[in-house]
Amino acid sequence: MKSHRILFVARAMPWPLHGGARLRDFNMLQALADGFEVDLLTVGRNQPQVDALCRNVYLPTPYYGDETPWLAIKRWAAASVETLTGPEPLWLTSKTNGMLRRAIRERAKDGQYDVVLASELSSAAVLLGHGETPVIYDAHNCEWRLLERTRQQQAGLRRRVLDREVPRLRAVERRTVTESKMVFVTAQSDLDELRMLAGADLAPHRIIPSTIDLKRYENVRAATPQPATILVPGKFDWQPNLIGLEWFADEVVPALRQRMQDNAFRVVVAGRMTEATKSKLDAVPEITAERNPDDMLDFFARASLVSVPVLVSSGTRLRIAEGLACKRPIVSTTPGAAGLDPGDGTPWIVADGTDSYADALARVLTDTALSKQVASDGWAFAETLDWNSLRVPLSEAIEGVVEAAR
């Protein structure tokens, strides 16, 4: 007999698994479904992998990446008006729309659920001050700090817009992490930043690390990769990720070309991206862009190296976790791996700056012994990240919130 009823609110359907947020949400759903009755409220198209885990799936509006042009115009227009007339920044209002916000509040009404678990800030902020159902906020990042780092990478009009956005986002996030009944964070580094934001007013909190379904990658681990093939996975319709990807394509790939000389290599960039991003990437001779794939497993199977060129934020750290689960060597920047704590030693290669990053890629591509050693060390750490480890801490946290609300 399953105990409490939970409404899980996700900003996007957590399948296909081509982004850290979706990976985290899907593994969270798996763990929740083991002991609770779970309803999912999200946007997009229903997926059987998700439907099998939920009691009900509510889809009030399309995912923004699947919208018609008219729906996209309406959403952006409404978001702009809401931002100009209210306290929330465009960073949040553009990720939802009126229909979704109304659906979240309607489903979260008093008495229907024991707990609402809101994934990401854009979902959690909608619920503040609406009803008595306790809200758990699953913070994928310290959002205002992420936007501040993004602002520092910008210039001109975009910089001026973000000058206004950052303090507004900071205010919303502070209110969310103080008024929620509990806050989940992915790593100690995020918790430290939220403590700096909220101080003693920070709600009760727990570190719930991002996890991976190791069984899902069994066939990939057994597959023979293609020689000198670099995979760059991620969600590249998200500006912080796009900043790092553009650096990689514009600076790192030409530097790697010089180092490889007569040794051919190829780069596959796979994940959510716009057509404009795909066209720009495809113009680089060594790069092939795979836009919005349904499944990433084949790309990991073919990769001989996984690259994580993140400059602004480490997000949910799941691109590294996926690579480790596939027994592939990883080359990452420091921000790309921030928050992951493997203990003694680092089972991936960390490099910052164009020259250092290109050097690291060239070493792994040309040194078979190094590649195998890094992959082996990474697998030992990956075994600690399986999603089954979420069951006990999630259950304890939710039971505690329910008891406190009685």
Image (cartoon, helix red, strand yellow):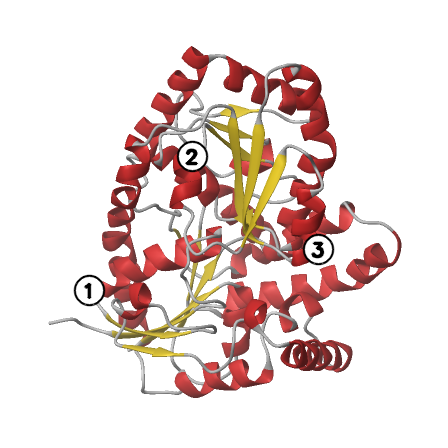
Drawn side of residue 380 relative to residue 323, left or right: left
Label 1, label 3: how far apart the Cα atoms are: 43 Å
Q: Position of residue 320 (x, y in %)?
A: 46, 37
The amino acid on which the numbered mark 2 sits, given as a three-letter code, is: Arg
Residue 62, image x, y percentages: 52, 76
**Picture disc at residue 302:** 2
Q: Nearer the viewer, residue 156 or 220?
A: 220
Q: Amino acid at mark 3?
A: Ala
Q: Does label 2 or label 1 sit earlier along the sequence?
A: 1
Q: Residue at x 26, y 71 (%)?
A: 403
Q: Is residue 337 above or below residue 4?
A: above
Residue 368 appears in view: yes
Residue at disc 1, secondary structure: loop
In the rendered image, residue 339, in percent from the top left (x then y), is placed at: 49, 39
According to the image, label 1 marks what residue? 35
Whole-angstrom CA distance, mark 2 to mark 3, is 25 Å
- Say the numbered circle drawn on residue 157: none
Query: Does residue 82 lie above or below 360 as drawn?
Result: below
Mark 2 Cα-neighbour bin, 10 Å: few <14, some 14–19, many ≥20: some
